[in-house]
Image (cartoon, rainbow, N blue to C red):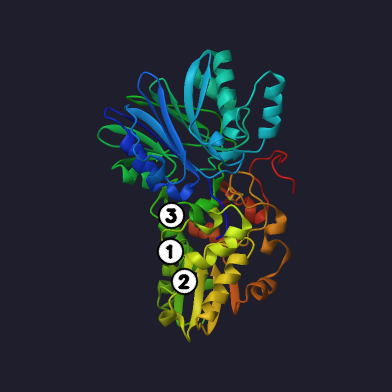
Amino acid sequence: MEGKEKCAVFGIYSNKPVFDLIYYGLYSMQHRGQESAGIATYTDKIEIHKAEGLVSEAFKGVFLEGCVGMGHVRYSTTGESGMGNSQPLIINYAGGSFAVGHNGNLINSLELRMQMKRRGSTFATTTDTEIIAKLIAQEHLKEGDFVKGIKQAMNQLRGSYSLVILKDKKIIAVRDPWALKPLIIGRSDNSIIVASESCALDAVGAKIVRDVKAGEIIVIDKNIKSDSVISERLAHCMFEYVYFARPDSIIDGLPVYEIRKKLGEILARDAPVDADIVVAVPASGITAAIGYARASNIPYGEGLMKNRYFGRTFILPEQIDREKGVRIKLNPIKSEISGKKLVLIDDSIVRGTTAKRIVKLLRDFGAAQVHVRITCPPLKEPCFYGIDMQTHGEFIAKENDIEEIRKQIGADSIRYNSIDSLIEAIGLPENNLCLACLNGNYPIKDKQLKLDV
Ligand code: SF4
């Protein structure tokens, strides 16, 4: 997969200091953002530390007191990267102060920013998150109640947002009315937790309570209170299941690992190959490759070794880095592939440049044949909801048929799962999923303001 993912949020209310638990939670969700990390806790005021880089680097020698807190890891999509835009973001206003972390992307942020500027708002960052936070603050002052303020703000926000807010010794979790991005509640003996992924609950020894519902606002202190705005329709991002989330996470009740394995099994059923070995593009293709191998009775082998200290190829900001990245990141194991017919399993193809390099690498190391099998149906349309796939021009599947893609990446054959197969593997009704980057059917029926496409 060549793509950018974005952020993760984590919030915790406890009767013990929470800094370490937030750190572990963020560490377990590092795959969702590697650009910067931040933690805010509450004592008698909000304490915050944010820094660039990985969680392990960002909090060296840092400790924040407090039994309530939140954290965020970031990969930028809206707004430039850099510390000015890092999160949590703190807002000070006549109603007090709060910290907010956001996973998602608004499609009406330009419109909202202009409207708010006309009404006298000023902005210190270029992020959507500041728009959301300032809107909540404004509506709080109008309504005289923080949760009512959030509801009023939600009625104006269009796009994806899973939010964690730290306000006056409370954690507030908010999920957009389409439930595009994941957000889950957990509980341990001492704590109530919200996190982007359930793997973060596992990391802090908490059990899943349930997912935050579409349009829901959860206020957590000693108890969990729920409020909500109306959900227009569900639109869970299919890409969380296919690529973004950790395979050990459970999202909206569905185990990601089982879905990825099923995607591989369906590929083996629908696109069989006479081959000697099933090889995954690590790490995101591994679970599906296991599924393919089991269903086809072709042995699975580690044909490609990943440098485990290397960030995802997609994470690198510049094309030049991406070019170098593939070769540094992956190295074939010659004894496993030389002279053999390979089935190469990956999760998705955007531009095709990475797939082309990997196929060449495998041939250079002696593979007799390389048959590419892709678990995600062809990506053709841009994502406006926080996954940075850029514009139409970047999608190899937009302009080219399967045979042309095969030629361009130099494979002996290539097949993708169909959209129906993807829906079968996930097991949710089609109208509960966002499939817009596959079929152009955007679940939020507004003019798409974010990209010039
Ligand atoms: S367009 Fe694609 S990547 Fe974006 S939210 Fe929808 S399914 Fe996810």
Numbered tag placed on residue 307 in the rendering: 1
Q: Position of residue 123 (x, y in %)?
A: 63, 26
Assess disc 2: are there few (<14), some (14-19) or many (≥20) residues with their C-alpha within 10 Å of its C-alpha: some
Q: Callout 1: 10 Å neighbours few (<14), some, many (20+)?
A: few
Taking depth in this image into account, of 316 and 15 the one nearest to the observer is 316
First in residue order: circle 3 vs circle 1: 3
Image check: 355 left or right of 209? right
Quadrant location of residue 314? bottom right
Residue 108 drawn at (x, y percent)? 67, 34
Residue bearing mark 2: 331
Does residue 334 appear in this view? yes
Instruction: Name the residue located 51 percent from the left edge and 14 percent from the top edge.
Output: 95
- How far separated are the C-alphas under marks 2 and 1? 8 Å
| Kind of element beneath mark 3 | helix
- The residue carrying pointer 3 sits among few (fewer than 14), some (14 to 19) or many (20 or more) residues within 10 Å by Cα, namely many
Q: What separation in Å lies between label 3 and label 2 (alpha carbons)?
A: 27 Å
Q: Which mark is residue 256?
A: 3
Q: Quick one: which residue is furthest to the bottom in this view?
A: 339
Residue plotted at (67% across, 49% down): 441
Relative depth, front residue between 263 and 5: 5
Q: Is mark 3 within 8 Å of ligand 1?
A: no
Give the quadrant of residue 221. Answer: top left
Residue 86 drawn at (x, y percent) = 52, 36
Q: Identify the mark nearer the N-term, 3 or 2.
A: 3
In the picture as drawn, the residue positioned furthest to the front comes out as: 61
Q: Is mark 2 within 8 Å of ligand 1?
A: no
Kind of residue sitting beneath label 1: Asn
- Kind of residue indicated by mark 3: Val
Tell me whether circle 3 and circle 1 mark residues in contact (CB < 8 Å).
Answer: no
Q: Nearer the viewer, mark 3 or mark 2?
A: 2
Q: Which residue is at a point 31% across and 27% down the rendered structure image? A: 67
Circle 2/circle 1 CB separation < 8 Å = yes
